[in-house]
Image (cartoon, rainbow, N blue to C red):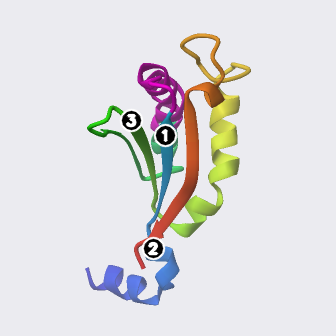
Amino acid sequence: MRIILVIVMFLPISALAEVVTVDFVRVLNGNTEEAVFYYENNWKQHRIKAVKKGFISSFKLLLKTSDDGQTDILLITGYASESQYENREKNFARIMSDTGRDGPVMMNDKPPSAFREISDKGIYTSD
């Protein structure tokens, strides 16, 4: 145990920092079923593979529906380190190229812009 503690003491703080990103998605025109299908069959599937490959540490897809029926989706991805986060585009490109498809799985012919709007991404670190 002492050896591990000594090693940890000499690691830079940034090597221990977890990075979490949150994408905020507004579902447009009551297309909740369409949007959930899209994220369950694309975003979530890519993250399941990314966890297995060690590219990310965690993920969560959350739905929030307001009293007036407006649905928002929060897409949360956890990276165990800054280097995992910095390599995210390269790693997800590898995962997406492994699918053998030319695009995302869709419920029907609606383009994503017809059922969702993505607002700014939040990025949080644990340091």
In this rendering, which labeled residue sits more in front, label 2 or label 1?
A: 1
- In this picture, is 1 found above or below 42? below
Q: Is residue 109 magenta?
A: no
Query: Residue 36 at what x, y percent from top left?
Result: 43, 26
> Which mark's residue is nearer the viewer, 3 or 2?
3
Q: Residues within 10 Å of mark 1 (few under 14, many from 20)?
A: many
Sequence-earlier tag: 2 or 1: 2
- The residue at 59%/65% (across/down) is 83
Residue at 48%, 48% (x, y): give it: 24
Q: Is residue 24 above or below residue 17?
A: above
Numbered tag placed on residue 17 in the rendering: 2
| Residue drawn at (33%, 32%) of the image | 69
SS under mark 3: strand
Answer few, some or many: residues within 10 Å of disc 3's Cα (few below 14, many 20 plus, some between 14 and 19).
some
User: Which amino acid, by three-letter code, is at mark 2?
Assistant: Ala
What's the residue at 54%, 28% (across, down)? 42
Q: Which residue is mark 1?
A: 26
Amino acid type, mark 3: Thr
How packed mark 2 is, by other alpha carbons closer than 10 Å (few <14, some 14-19, many 20 or more), is some
Quarter-of-image position of residue 75: top left
Note whether 68 is above or below 105 in the view shown: below
Q: Residue 93 occupies which quadrant of the picture?
A: top right
The numbered dot on residue 71 is 3
